[in-house]
Amino acid sequence: MILILLADGFEEIEALTPLDVLRRAGLDVKTVGISGKFVEGSHGIRVECDLSESEALNITPELLILPGGMPGATNLDASTTTDRLIKTTLNSGGRLAAICAAPLVLGRRGLLKGRRAVCYPGFEGELACATVCDAPVVTDGCITTAKGMGAALDFALELVELLVSTEQKEKIAKAIMKP
């Protein structure tokens, strides 16, 4: 199962685009409300999450997605649920993905050390010993990072390619008319 963590102040496009695209790929994806079943995005869009924090802690995700947005990323960073799910995901051989400001969560935990990574401009100092790249999306080992909302579709399609196949990525990209 894939989990997308949503904390108050999350960037809606960075959360909902991967949710939509990964479900189109036939993957089991659930949203998790950090601090409540209802979470409000940084632009006032309120989302009812699929799972509560306590329900999510009983799952071993194959992929954990951290959307950015402010203060969403810092709210994720402050959550012990985030820490527990990162640990569970990595200990089981799963993947982590973070976009926009959310790579700061991975950087602050030393998970980007020696890896290539990207983030929203201005957050590079939070990437702690990563090699900061200029690409919209970067995968290095089991971690995928992306720059921001404008890269959300490429981020989601990269995850489809990593979890399913290049063919499925191309099929979805064609179906949604991605140039």
Image (cartoon, helix red, strand yellow):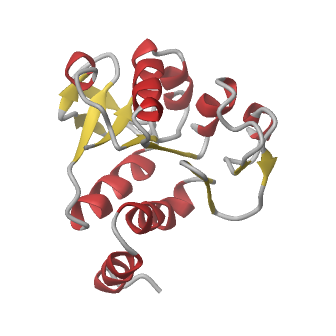
Q: Residue 169: image x %, image y %? A: 38, 75
**Viewer-proximal residue among 61 and 175:** 61
Q: Position of residue 130 (x, y in %)?
A: 78, 42
Can residue 8 be seen here? The reply is no
Measuring 55% from the left and 62% from the top, which residue is drawn there?
151
- In front: 10, or 89? 89
As displayed, is residue 108 above or below residue 153? above
Q: Based on the displayed image, in which of its 4 quarters is residue 73 positioned?
A: top right
Residue at image coords 50%, 60%: 155
Question: Is 14 drawn above or below residue 38 in the view shown?
Answer: below
Residue at image position (67%, 47%) is 119
Furthest residue in direction front, as rendered: 92
- Quarter of the figure that contains the N terminus: top left
- Going by the image, does 147 lie left or right of 54? right
Residue 132 percent location from the top left of the image: 79, 50
Classify residue 114 as left or right of residue 89: right
Q: Is residue 19 above or below residue 86?
A: below
| Residue 81 in the image, given as x and y percentages of width and height | 39, 17
**Residue 146 sits above or below residue 53 on the image:** below
Q: Is residue 54 in view from this perspective? A: yes
Q: Residue at x 74, y 32 (%)?
A: 126
Report the number of numbered marks. 0
In this view, the residue in front, 121 or 4, is 4
